[in-house]
Image (tube, rainbow, N blue to C red):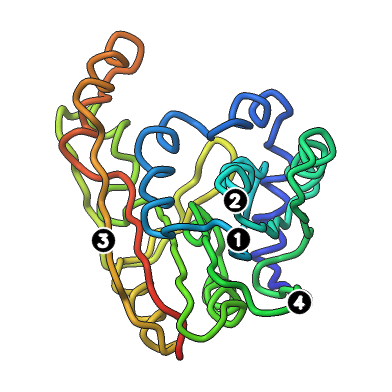
Amino acid sequence: MTSRANETAIGRWNASTTREAMETAAADGDFAKRHLVNSTLLRLLGDVRGRRLLDAGCGNGYFSRILAGHGAQVVGVEPTDVMCAFAREKEAELRQGMAYVQADLTRLPDLGAPFDAAVCSMVLMAIPDWKPAMRACVEAVRPGGPLVFALVHPAFEQLLGTWVEHGAYRVERYLEEYEIAGAAASDFHRPLSAYLNELASLGCRLRETAEPGLDPAVAAAARPTTPGIDSYVHLPNFLLFSAEAPA
């Protein structure tokens, strides 16, 4: 059963996600995903041609479409009505051969044979009851298959706004778990050890962690319209890790 906290979070995303926002991010996501997240996800996944991939929490489906463009066979799972409908609409338009399933990640339906790999990008920190979602991703992948997760870096959350205000990053609480209210919905702070220890408890083997920084040239171009953008050059706002499912 979906937890009440997760139902509330899904409802907030449903209510706050606009058509305009989804259209703007339909090709390759927002600025941060274009310049900091996408290329690292693809590198960690490796050659995806002909491989069957799970895009867990696919949102508007932009990364599923990128994966399909690289030759993958993709199943995207998204719990919100509005984003799943948008992803299906784009698939009807582009005909890339993808399937989109509307489901809570903590209660995945039968998706067929085990996947060759799974990616869960910028999702786990937005799920209040997140551990069942990580477990579901692990259990959906073939033995020894790769799983790639991307998060807002727990040590550098709200990086841009803090940098603008103080000229440096400041953090007062790290070891606690707490909710971070956002314009669209909430994220949930947990220390990095919570995610890595859960992976270990599920029998996964960590292969790599990545903390991408922004290209200084990209930051220079964005500086006139985005105060504080240099914070992305000096500190990692995003954390990605690659693991192997139990053999």
SS class of the residue under badge 2? Answer: loop
Q: Nearer the viewer, mark 1 or mark 3?
A: 1
Q: Quadrant of residue 36?
A: top left
- Mark sitting earlier along the chain (4/2): 2
Q: Kindly identify which residue carries mark 2.
A: 71
SS class of the residue under badge 4? Answer: loop
Q: Kindly identify which residue carries mark 4.
A: 112
**Amino acid under disc 1:** Gly
- Mark sitting earlier along the chain (3/4): 4
> In percent of the image, x 76 and y 48: which residue is there?
84
User: What is the number of the mark on residue 50?
Assistant: 1
**Amino acid under disc 2:** Gly
User: What is the number of the mark on residue 174?
Assistant: 3
Please tell me which residue lies in front, 233 or 226: 233
**Amino acid under disc 4:** Gly
**Amino acid under disc 3:** Tyr
- Mark sitting earlier along the chain (2/3): 2
Asked whether the residues under the numbered discs 1 and 2 touch, taking CB atoms below 8 Å apart as contact, a structural biologist would say yes
The percent coordinates of residue 4 (x first, y second) are 70, 68
Please tell me which residue lies in front, 134 or 16: 134
The percent coordinates of residue 50 (x first, y second) are 60, 60
> In percent of the image, x 50 and y 54: which residue is there?
121
Asked whether the residues under the numbered discs 1 and 3 touch, taking CB atoms below 8 Å apart as contact, a structural biologist would say no
Mark-to-mark CA distance, 1 and 2: 6 Å
* Residue 11 sits above or below residue 190 on the image: above
Q: Nearer the viewer, mark 4 or mark 2?
A: 2
Q: Nearer the viewer, mark 2 or mark 3?
A: 2
| Quadrant where the image shows the N terminus | bottom right
